[in-house]
Every structure is written in structure tokens, then in C-alpha cells.
Image: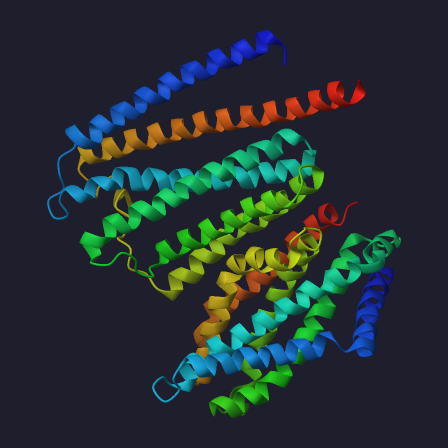
Amino acid sequence: MSPDEVEDKEEESNIMVWLTGSALLAAMIGIFIYVPTERTEGVIQRIMYFHIPCAWLSFFAFFVVFICSILFLWKKDREWDIYAHASAEIGVVFCSLVLITGPIWARPIWGAWWVWDARLTSTLILWIIYVSYLMLRAQSDAGSMRARYAAVLGIVGFLDIPLIHFSVLWWRAFHPQPKVITSEGIGKGMDPSMLATLGLSLCAFTLLYFLLMGERVRQEQLKDEIDRLKREKLYSS
Amino acid sequence: MNLFLSQITAIVWKDVVTELKTRELFSAMFIFALLVILIFIFSVNLSIVKASEVGPGILWVAFLFSGTLGLNRSFVMEKENGCLMGLMLVPADRTAIYFGKLISNFVFLTIMELFILPLFMIFFNIDLLEHLAPLLLVIFLGTLGFCALGTLLSSLASNLKTREIMLPILLYPILVPIIIGVVRMTGQILAGEPLSEMMNWIGLTASFDIIYIGVSIMTIDHILEE
């Protein structure tokens, strides 16, 4: 990377920081000030505006892992490996947040921290799959072997999602029926102000994903660069 | 095609001969499965719960745990003395190695399961004979799926530093759909329901088998590469 390029990238990431920051701020205002409190569930229902975006973000991140894994095995380019790694890390963080916010919401509403409902179970299994993906990465030394193995697991793990979904669905289901997209059309089950807040929150979290992704990828690239320089300057002299 | 088949047969035959000579894997798997069943019998009170309700779960846990022993062995054995390198130098397709290993794992596990079934019948006082045909179909589908994914991940884990630890950690979460499926089906069969009642589970297990054999064919080249 030339110094000019570094500067360009820094400027880009500055814009991204401001954009994401203001979107998150707007989402906070929406969640805590603008949106009315839900009639039956009370103030706890506001956690939904975090819970759903986190869930969306983790699924999206795992999908990116899947795509990048395929592209890596196809093109054998280190870039795709970095993207898959970064996305898996972000996905696990947000999946953990889903598993934390879920019980906080469930306790007063369902009367239990955890029930073995279809969507809870599949989120938990998904979390374990991607934690094992990160463990696999930590277990093997950097290099083409780690990248190939991780890519295979990224593909195998994602293809399991539909199977997990159906198996736990037939196993049992208690979770509230989808409210945002129902058979009557999009957004009929909810107040427009709530839908707007949820949409805003979703946008803010998606921006946050791209911000974190950019930072993490840049970190990993710099790490590669340092390794390369070390090899060149340290061992050749 | 003929060449491919004979390559697969050669690998399976090699594994069978090795096992006949050493006899270390099969006896270990069998005793381990038996121990798992015993531990479960001590940990659930069979005078309170119905044997036909907990039985299927215990049976499959025993199968999966002892199957993991076999999977761990199947590629680690090849790592000793550089046998895997020899296998890869053979002018054969990598998928032939995969299928050879898949079939030998499948054969060992199935034989072990056939030995465990009569013991299960005696310990739990469940009559398996009247439902034998559907039960064998479920065992076939479940074992095939377990071996299809297990062989792929075992070839991957055998190159890691902590292979014995990593294989179950990688394998079990992905196996969840098939575990739920086979335990449900076994329970329904023991309750006397016909196979037509559980077509959705059969479809799920069969698609698991097909998906993971397909994925393995496509990705094994990237794992067995040195």
C-alpha cells in the first residue's frame, strides 16, 4: 500500500464512522424517545429494536462467510479468506448479543429465561457452529491450510442452516409468529412508527456491520503487511 | 468408472484387512458403545421413565459417540508412517479416497450397531424384531449421514494439532438435524407407527445425506492437498 492509498482509505473510513455514528444515534432517539410503548408488553418490548437487527446482522454475516468461502476455494485469493474470517467474528459477536437480549426479553413475557423453541434452538446451534469455525481457525497455523479448512467448514456450516431450521421446527415451536412480514402483507402487524424505528435500527446496524468489517479487514491486511516486511527486512540482513 | 470402483474397493479392502489383523478399532467401539448405554441406564431411573421413550435417544448417543472413535481413527491411522501421503501419491482421484474411507467407516459402524441392537433389546425390554425393517432403514440413513460428514471433517481434523478434541466440536453441532431426525423416527417406529407417518423426517435425513456427500465430493480436493 502506498501512503496515498492509506490516506484515501482513512478518509473513507472517517466518513463511514460519522455515517454509522449518526445512524446509530438516530436509531437510539427513535427507540427511546420517538416510538410509543407497546400496550401489552410494556417498556421491555423496546429491546426488540436491538434483538431483531442483531439477529439479522448475524445471519447476514454468516451468509457473507459462506459466499467468501466459496469464492476462496474457487479463486484461492487471500482477500476472500480475510473477509470470511472478519465476517465470522462479527457474526459470532452479534449472535451472542441475540442470545443475551433474547432471555432478557423472554423472562418477563414468557416467564422463563429460555424455552426450547425452534428459533432459539437454531440460533444457539448456529452460534456453536461458528464458534467452532473460529476455534478451527485458532487451532491451525496461518497459511493456505487454515484458509482452506476454514472455507470448507464455512460452506458445510451454512448449508446446515435450512436443515437445522426444519428439524427444530418439526421438533417444536413457541416463538411469536412473524409480525413484520405476515401473510397479509409487509408491515400490517405493526404500528407504522414501530416499523419505522425498526427499519431505522436495521439500517444503522447494517452500517455498523460494514464499518466493523472494514476495520477488521484493514487490521488483517496490515498484519499480513507486517509479516511480509519482517520476512524481508529482518531475515535478509 | 470401473477403475474408480476398483480404486475404492482397494482402499476399503485395505482398511478391512488392517482391522482384521489388529482388531483394535472394532472392539474399542463396541465396548465404548456398551459403556455409554450402561452409564445412561445408571443416570436415568428406568422404573419412572418408560424405556421406549428414553431408549431411542440413548441408543443413538451410543452409536454417535462410538462412531466418533472410529472416525478419529480412520485418518489418524493414515497419518502414521506417512500412509496418507502414499494414498495421495496413488494416481487416483481424491474422491476415491473419500469414498473408500466413507465406505469403510460406514461398514465398521454398521457392524458395531448390529451387535449393539440385540443387547439394547435385552437391556430395555423392547421388542425390536416386529419393527426390524423400518428400524434398519432409519439406521442406514442416519449412519450414512453421520459417516458422510464425519469422514470429511475427520480428514480435515487429522491435520490439526488437537485432532481428537476438534473432531467432535466441529462435527456434533452440524449433526443436530440428523440426530433429532433419527431419534424421533426411532421413537415413532418403536411406538408402532408406520413409515408413511414420518416421511418428512425421512426426507430431511436423506437430503442431509445427499447434501453432505455432494459437498464432500466438491471440497475433498481442497482438504487432501499437500
- Any part of residue B136 in sight: no
For the point 89% across and 53% down, the residue is B91
Q: Position of residue A214 (x, y in %)?
A: 49, 25
On screen, residue B142 versus residue A37, left or right, reads right
Tell me the colour scheme of the image.
rainbow
Quadrant for the C terminus of chain B, please.
top right
Q: Is B17 situated above or below B82? A: below
**Looking at the image, is A19 positioned above or below residue A96?**
above
Residue B69 x %, y % = 64, 68
Q: Tell me if A187 is positioned left or right of B226 in this view.
A: left
Q: Quadrant of residue B102?
A: bottom right
Q: Residue at x 70, y 69 (%)?
A: B105
Q: Is residue B102 left or right of residue A220?
A: right
Q: Quadrant of residue B79?
A: bottom right
Q: Is there any visible trace of residue A26 in the rendered image? A: yes
B203 lies above or below A205: below
Q: Is residue A78 left or right of residue B189?
A: right
Q: How many marks?
A: 0
Of A228 and B12, the residue lying toward us = A228
Where is residue B199 drawn, in percent x and y?
A: 48, 70
Residue A191 is situated, as x and y percent measured from the top left of the image, at 17, 37
Q: Residue at x 46, y 17 (%)?
A: A13
Given residues B161 and A162, the one toward you in this image is: B161
Q: Where, quadrant-wise, is the N terminus of chain B in this rendering?
A: bottom right
Q: Residue most toward the left? A: A39
Task: Answer with the quarter of the image where residue A59 lies.
Answer: top left
